Amino acid sequence: MRNLLVPAILCALMAPAAVAQDYEPPLADEPPSEDMPAPESDMLERGLENFMRNLLDRAEPHLDRLGRDLGDTLGAVAPVFEDIGKLMDDVRNYQAPERLENGDILIRRRADAPPPPPVGDALRDMLRPAPGDDPRLDPLPDTPDAPLPLPERDPENEIEL
């Protein structure tokens, strides 16, 4: 009770001092009358504002369409990202990335790590080429575990290791 009494007394004593101050907030600038011409900076500011407003008004339908298209694309790719996240499982199951001389980056799975989880359907479907994309490939079988046919060997394009 005594702890609350001291601040209450101090506030009561300070109140008359706060009221006694003759502080008046500064007056707002008077708006320019219409018969006086506006300064050049105001005209430039209004011109830039109108330019930007017109630009945004003209770009708005295009930006809306772009946003819808990006949203649709993200919605279509989201299951693939989920499958990739599940496939990666735990970062501790992998060694540090290694950069080869040719610029390739290898991320090897540790030998003592548990077996990797299976590839998800969305990722498998994305990696599978469409039947009409590659004329060398026959239509793919419906079973997801069937291996893809290999292209014919071309000795000119092989690298000797």
Image (cartoon, grey):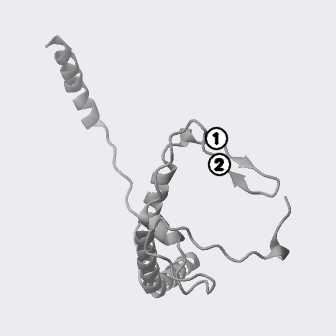
**In the depicted view, which residue is nearer to us: 19 or 138?**
138
**In the depicted view, which residue is nearer to us: 155 or 35?**
155
Q: Dividing the image into 4 quarters, which one contains the N terminus?
A: top left
* Left or right of 71, for residue 153: right
Instruction: Tell me, yes or no, whether the two marked residues, 2 and 1, touch with CB atoms within 8 Å.
Output: yes
Type of the residue with mark 2: Ile
Q: Position of residue 51 (x, y in %)?
A: 52, 84
**In the depicted view, which residue is nearer to us: 50 or 118?**
118
Q: Position of residue 40 (x, y in %)?
A: 58, 79
Residue 28 appears anywhere in the view? yes
Give me the C-alpha separation between circle 2 and circle 1.
6 Å
Residue furthest to the left in view is 1
Q: Dividing the image into 4 quarters, which one contains the C terminus?
A: bottom right
The residue beneath circle 2 is: 107
Q: Residue at x 83, y 65 (%)?
A: 159
Query: In the structure shown, which secondary structural element does the residue marked by tag 1 occupy?
Result: loop
Residue furthest to the top in view is 2
Q: Position of residue 122 (x, y in %)?
A: 43, 66
Q: Position of residue 5 (x, y in %)?
A: 16, 16
Image quarter of residue 15: top left
Image quarter of residue 134: bottom right
Residue 37 appears anywhere in the view? no
Q: Residue at x 44, y 70 (%)?
A: 143
Badge 1: how crowded within 10 Å, few (<14), some, or many (20+)?
few
Type of the residue with mark 1: Gln
- Ranked by sequence position, the earlier of labels 2 and 1 is 1
The residue beneath circle 1 is: 95
Query: In the structure shown, which secondary structural element does the residue marked by tag 2 occupy?
Result: loop
Up the image or down, 79 lies above or below 150; here it is above
Up the image or down, 2 lies above or below 135; here it is above
